[in-house]
Image (tube, grey):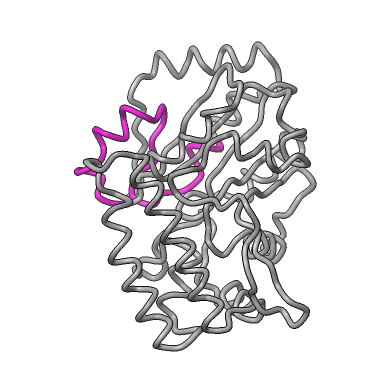
């Protein structure tokens, strides 16, 4: 059952007051995608990311799925191990992403597979997301979706378009996959974005997006992982309200998440709390 936890109510009230004083022209929203705007459970089955659907549903055949799962089993424990230095983990994440991209080329990944994933109906936006997108749209507030998804910008854009959420104020920063004329995947452009290098400086490498926010220094940040707050590094942010979606293992991880986020939504919850925050900030 959804639960909202606010570690320091006094602090978040102060932040809201400062953001309101500066006005909407100085405000924007920065959000992760997988597990943040989307739910991680579908019909009680864990579907944490776009890539997990490709890996688990045999779109590229059993051989691909087996090899991709072996990569996950090798690298994911490194990704989440708090004892391994961040620099070491970051190098391993880049290694994982690049090895996996070679696997995608080997097994003929293409835009047809992207469309199958998007049309599968197994990617679910959170309840209340329509109000979230609409509020930002009518107030002309930029929403920057910053994702380390290895399926990249095209997949997220196609999904948002299908869901009728790709408004003029919505921008996506993610991996840029390269396709040949037939729609087959052939490579990836730099910078390669993975789960542990999502720093704000990468946004500057997407100038069409960065120019929309470079004069805005108050942000509502949404993420489902502590690593998602790395994005504030390298940006000139004056005030930030950090919302964390703690989707599972709440008892185990809550105290750690409370140290990093101002507002927590537990148990793969809805956007209700985010919408209420926006209403207070924008009223």
Question: What is the x, y in percent for residue 78?
Answer: 28, 53
**Residue found 45% across the figure and 84% down from its top:** 58
Q: Is residue 255 left or right of residue 110?
A: left
Which region of the structure is painted magenta?
248-275
Above or below for 4 versus 239: below
Q: Is residue 35 left or right of residue 26?
A: left
Give the image quarter of residue 246.
top left
Asked whether 88 falls inside the magenta stretch, the response is: no
Above or below for 180 versus 81: below
For the C terminus, the image quarter is top right
Question: What is the x, y in percent for residue 23?
Answer: 70, 17
Above or below for 57 versus 14: below
**Residue found 32% across the figure and 60% down from its top:** 75
Asked whether 264 falls inside the magenta stretch, the response is: yes
- Of residues 73 and 269, the one nearer the viewer is 73
Give the image quarter of residue 115.
bottom right
Q: Is residue 1 left or right of residue 163?
A: left
Q: Is residue 148 left or right of residue 236?
A: left
**Residue found 51% across the figure and 72% down from its top:** 102
Question: What is the x, y in percent for residue 212?
Answer: 76, 34
**Residue found 41% across the figure and 66% down from its top:** 47
- Of residues 196 and 222, the one nearer the viewer is 196
Give the image quarter of residue 21.
top right
Above or below for 277 versus 157: above
């Amino acid at each position: 059952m959804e639960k909202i936890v606010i570690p320091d109510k006094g602090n978040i009230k102060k932040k809201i007051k400062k953001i309101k004083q500066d006005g909407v022209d100085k405000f924007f929203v920065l959000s992760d995608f997988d597990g943040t705007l989307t739910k991680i459970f579908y019909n009680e089955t864990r579907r944490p990311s776009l890539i997990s659907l490709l890996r688990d549903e045999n779109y590229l055949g059993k051989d691909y799925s087996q090899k991709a799962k072996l990569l996950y089993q090798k690298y994911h424990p490194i990704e989440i191990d708090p004892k391994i230095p961040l620099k070491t983990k970051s190098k391993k994440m880049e290694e994982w992403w690049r090895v996996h991209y070679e696997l995608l080329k080997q097994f003929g990944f293409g835009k047809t597979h992207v469309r199958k994933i998007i049309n599968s109906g197994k990617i679910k936006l959170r309840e209340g997301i329509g109000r979230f997108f609409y509020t930002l749209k009518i107030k002309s507030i930029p929403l920057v979706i910053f994702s380390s998804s290895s399926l990249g910008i095209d997949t997220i854009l196609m999904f948002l378009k299908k869901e009728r959420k790709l408004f003029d104020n919505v921008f996506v920063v993610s991996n840029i996959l390269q396709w040949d004329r037939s729609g087959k995947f052939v490579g990836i452009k730099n910078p390669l974005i993975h789960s542990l290098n999502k720093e704000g400086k990468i946004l500057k490498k997407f100038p069409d997006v960065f120019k929309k926010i470079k004069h805005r220094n108050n942000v509502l940040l949404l993420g489902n992982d502590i690593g998602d707050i790395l994005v504030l590094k390298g940006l000139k942010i004056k005030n930030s309200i950090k919302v964390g979606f703690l989707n599972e293992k709440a008892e185990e991880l809550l105290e750690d998440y409370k140290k990093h986020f101002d507002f927590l939504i537990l148990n793969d919850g809805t956007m209700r709390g985010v919408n209420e925050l926006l209403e207070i900030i924008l009223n």
